[in-house]
Image: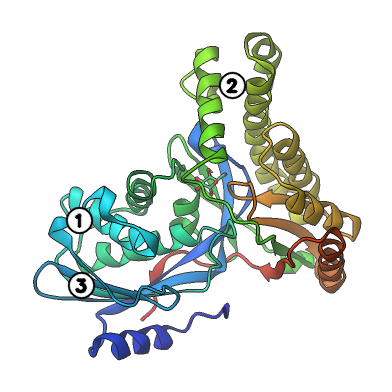
């Protein structure tokens, strides 16, 4: 899959499929979370940035209530649905993302009639880089504009989250959609997930001679089931026992008391959230004071907390992190929901080849599937591209 996203290719593919020109092409990026993992649904802090890989949709509105959808990667051909018969349980496969957004918008009273849609994406799926949020945000941005719905970016974030929670069935927070919608070139988004207040934080890695390398372990994860929901349930239990609305309301000073009230495992889950929130605040402060070269220790501490306290890492992610650190990374951590997906490493530009080769060799030695390794830089958020 090529990383470049050519609006002309997307428009031409639409025309080839549907025989007409689209009303427009909209794109929304995937993301890397620099730090702040599983803090979003605990009303805490996150610091993601959009990456230079995105989903793009070409759309043309039609008379009636029929939608026809096709993607450059789906093997279902053209999927035809009657929008009036759309319900949460009837959407499946990749079309659940665009149709989920359309369903939520229609629930909110946005009048969306028939349309044709062509989807192309350069965000690898299952890599923990928010390929699904990229689709949701591209579609939400497109219909917000096409229907003149006038929804704010923060409202569009919640539309994407509802599609994910209520249609796809994954109990996720607002991290991914916020990164995809609120990012601007060269910045990370510092977001308070309780208030949805956000601030753009300059992240000029190149000026510091640094880059972020992504190691996609190829270990796939599914947030609709399993560990992600279990972690969320642990956090909710912790908050309930501690008598707070969410773990956002616990700080480091409250941990000794929490240790006495919680079972050992729930305490470690809580400790991850509490310390991770503080690490996000510290990262923002350090970026401001000293620049990106000084945040490595915080990234690595975040990984240790996810590995040991929250237990959402896996051998492949740990190997990627440890190998990158042993070969000159200033800091490294898994990014996203965990149980697979990608790790990120903050490295000097000059070390890129050496770190990449070392990680590949370590994976081969361990008998793991070869990872995909590539650099990412902070990119703009969702927008109309043609
Ligand atoms: C996934 C979810 C997000 C967030 C992260 C973990 O990406 O979609 O809402 O919870 O995991 O930080």
User: What is the C-alpha distance between the residues marked 3 and 2?
Assistant: 47 Å
| Residue position marked by numbered label 3 in the rendering | 115
| Residue position marked by numbered label 2 in the rendering | 250
User: Which is nearer the N-term, disc 3 or disc 2?
Assistant: 3
Callout 3: helix, strand or loop? strand
In the image, 301 versus 172, the foreground residue is 172
In the image, 152 versus 241, the foreground residue is 241
- Decide if residue 338 is on the left or right side of residue 197: right
In the rendered view, tell whether residue 154 sits above or below residue 244: below
Callout 1: helix, strand or loop? loop
User: What is the C-alpha distance between the residues marked 2 and 1?
Assistant: 42 Å
Residue reaching furthest left? 64
Q: Is mark 3 in CB contact (under 8 Å) with mark 2?
A: no
In the image, 203 versus 312, the foreground residue is 312
**Which marked residue is nearer to the observer: mark 2 or mark 1?**
1
Q: Name the quadrant of the C terminus.
A: bottom left
**Which marked residue is nearer to the observer: mark 1 or mark 3?**
1
Q: Name the quadrant of the N terminus.
A: bottom right
User: Which is nearer the N-term, disc 1 or disc 3?
Assistant: 1
Q: Is residue 111 visible?
A: no
Residue 333 circle label: none
**Which marked residue is nearer to the observer: mark 3 or mark 2?**
3
Residue for point 62% across, 34% down = 277
Callout 2: helix, strand or loop? loop
In the rendered view, tell whether residue 10 sits above or below residue 166: below
In the rendered view, tell whether residue 134 sits above or below residue 53: above
């Amino acid at each position: 899959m090529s990383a470049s996203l050519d609006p002309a290719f997307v428009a031409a593919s639409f025309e080839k499929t549907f025989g007409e020109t689209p009303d427009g092409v909209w794109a929304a990026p995937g993301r890397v979370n620099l730090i702040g993992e599983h803090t979003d649904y605990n009303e805490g802090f996150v610091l993601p940035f959009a990456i230079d890989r995105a989903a793009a949709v070409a759309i043309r509105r039609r008379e009636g209530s029929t939608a026809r959808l096709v993607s450059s990667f789906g093997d279902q051909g053209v999927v035809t649905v009657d929008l009036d018969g759309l319900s949460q349980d009837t959407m499946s496969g990749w079309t659940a993302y665009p149709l989920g957004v359309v369903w939520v918008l229609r629930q909110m009273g946005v009048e969306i009639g028939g349309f044709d849609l062509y989807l192309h994406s350069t965000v690898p799926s299952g890599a923990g880089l928010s390929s699904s949020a990229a689709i949701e945000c591209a579609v939400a941005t497109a219909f917000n504009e096409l229907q003149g719905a006038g929804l704010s970016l923060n409202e569009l974030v919640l539309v994407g989250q509802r599609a994910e929670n209520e249609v796809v069935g994954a109990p996720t927070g607002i991290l991914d959609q916020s990164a995809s919608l609120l990012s601007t070139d060269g910045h990370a988004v510092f977001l308070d997930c309780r208030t949805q207040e956000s601030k753009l934080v300059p992240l000029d890695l190149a000026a510091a001679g640094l880059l972020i390398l992504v190691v996609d372990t190829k270990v796939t994860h599914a947030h609709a089931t399993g560990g992600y929901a279990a972690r969320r349930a642990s956090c909710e239990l912790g908050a309930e026992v501690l008598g707070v609305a969410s773990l956002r309301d616990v700080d480091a000073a409250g941990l000794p008391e929490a240790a006495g009230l919680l079972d050992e495992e729930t305490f470690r889950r809580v400790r991850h959230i509490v310390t991770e929130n503080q690490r996000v605040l510290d990262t923002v402060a350090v970026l401001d004071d000293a620049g990106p070269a000084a945040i490595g220790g915080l990234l690595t501490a975040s990984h240790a907390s996810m590995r040991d306290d929250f237990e959402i890492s896996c051998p492949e992610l740990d190997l990627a992190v440890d190998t990158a650190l042993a070969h000159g990374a200033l800091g490294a951590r898994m990014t996203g929901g965990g149980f697979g997906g990608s790790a990120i490493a903050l490295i000097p530009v000059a070390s890129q080849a050496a770190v990449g080769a070392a990680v590949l060799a370590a994976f081969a030695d361990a008998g793991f599937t070869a990872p995909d390794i590539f650099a990412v830089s902070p990119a703009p958020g969702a927008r109309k591209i043609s």
